[in-house]
Amino acid sequence: MHIRKVSLGYISIPLKTPFKTALRKVDRVNDLIVKIEDEDGRAGYGEAPPTAVITGETRQSIETAVREYLAPAVTGMDLNEPEEIFAAMERAIAKNTSAKAAVDIALHDLIAKEKGVPLFRYLAGDNTAGIRTRLKTDLTISVNDPQTMARDALLAVENGFDILKVKVGKGGLQDVERIRAIRDAIGMGPAIRVDANQGWTRQEAVRTIGMMEDALLGIELVEQPVSCHDFEGMQYVTEMVKTDILADESVFSYEDAYRLIKERGADLINIKLMKTGGIHNAMRICDLAEKNGIRCMAGCMLESAVSVSGAAHLAGARAVITMCDLDGPSLCAENPYQGGPVYNGPDIELTQTPGIGIGEPPVDFEDGVRPR
């Protein structure tokens, strides 16, 4: 069975509240949707968010990468030879990881549909012992003043979320006060994961995390405390604090993960499909982490249910992924899709529907191939 057609569309979904980090503020999900069809008319779907401050990609660059490079490269290829397809994508264009991820997710969705199995079963292969169909995600608390963050955290806990991912990185001492205010509001029961989004220097990170440790604020981990380019800084912070350090923006590729593990630049790795270029490379990072005894998180950008469902199926297939930050659909004010994993507060349930399980997105698709 061969790839007959690649099409593109766009989805725009309002968020319940503005999403604010040390890097940006966003109030809508505005993502590109990829549709890949085979000769029998079956279709797979993928998604890419323009996240210029992290991946360097804009809506225009993602569309160009798909239309002019990736779609022409994969059209006509045999779906029974997925390794050849992914190799062709890598040859077609360098980097552009979100564009590749959208095509990659759509391909995995379509391949699993052709085999008549949910994506997590296809990804697990013969290793079915680690399969999980029930996952739990944290919920992001955007960076604000301490009182607003405490209120948002309390509302999240009242809505059933017992793991919070708290955005900081706007000032060391004030960041401590943000976490203290949240702890005072929610008590010591719920878990708190702190995400600095590269917002600290290495010295500020050690000092701030140390103050959180001394105050007994019960922090589970700290994510990406320093610049993604500062591998030595990641190594320094990991060595100097007791709290586990989770690498996010520092890991885009298998090579990044290999270096980070070799140099002990983090205790944990956050795998995001928009950084790895999709599920194919994410699986390679899972293999590497598993071999080295490094636990992983399945994360997402500001994405809707299409690409988050791909990440959820990956998490369900791989036991090395022990944490999920897949709250994109929970942050959206509405869900325009039919089918797919069921998101019920913090709980994500994978279904037995083939592929990622989502029906055709309610967008207008246009031919995605534009010859160079």
Image (tube, rainbow, N blue to C red):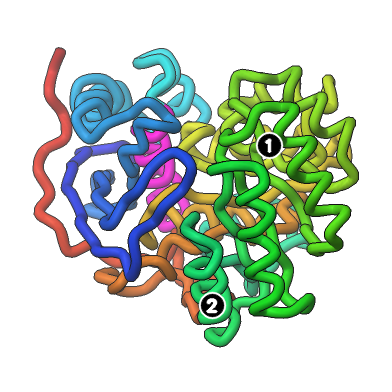
Task: Provide the residue designation for mark 1.
Answer: 247
User: Is 105 included in the stretch rendered in magenta?
Assistant: yes
Task: Provide the residue designation for mark 2.
Answer: 156
Residue lying at 83% horizontally and 34% vertically, measured from the top left: 238
Identify residue type, mark 1: Ala
Residue 170 rendering spot, x and y as whole percentages: 54, 43
Image quadrant holding the N terminus, namely top left
Q: How many numbered dots are placed on residues in this image?
A: 2
Identify residue type, mark 2: Ala
Residue 2 rendering spot, x and y as whole percentages: 32, 37
- Reply above or below: 190 against 77: below
The kind of secondary structure element at disc 1 is strand
- Reply above or below: 7 against 133: above
Q: Please say whether residue 325 is visible from this viewpoint.
A: yes
Please state the extent of the stretch shown in magenta in the rendering. Answer: 97-115
User: Is 87 included in the stretch rendered in magenta?
Assistant: no
* Disc 2/disc 1 C-alpha distance (Å): 25 Å
Q: Please say whether residue 261 is visible from this viewpoint.
A: no
Q: Is residue 78 left or right of residue 35?
A: right
Crowdedness of circle 2 by 10 Å Cα count: few (<14), some, many (20+)? Answer: many
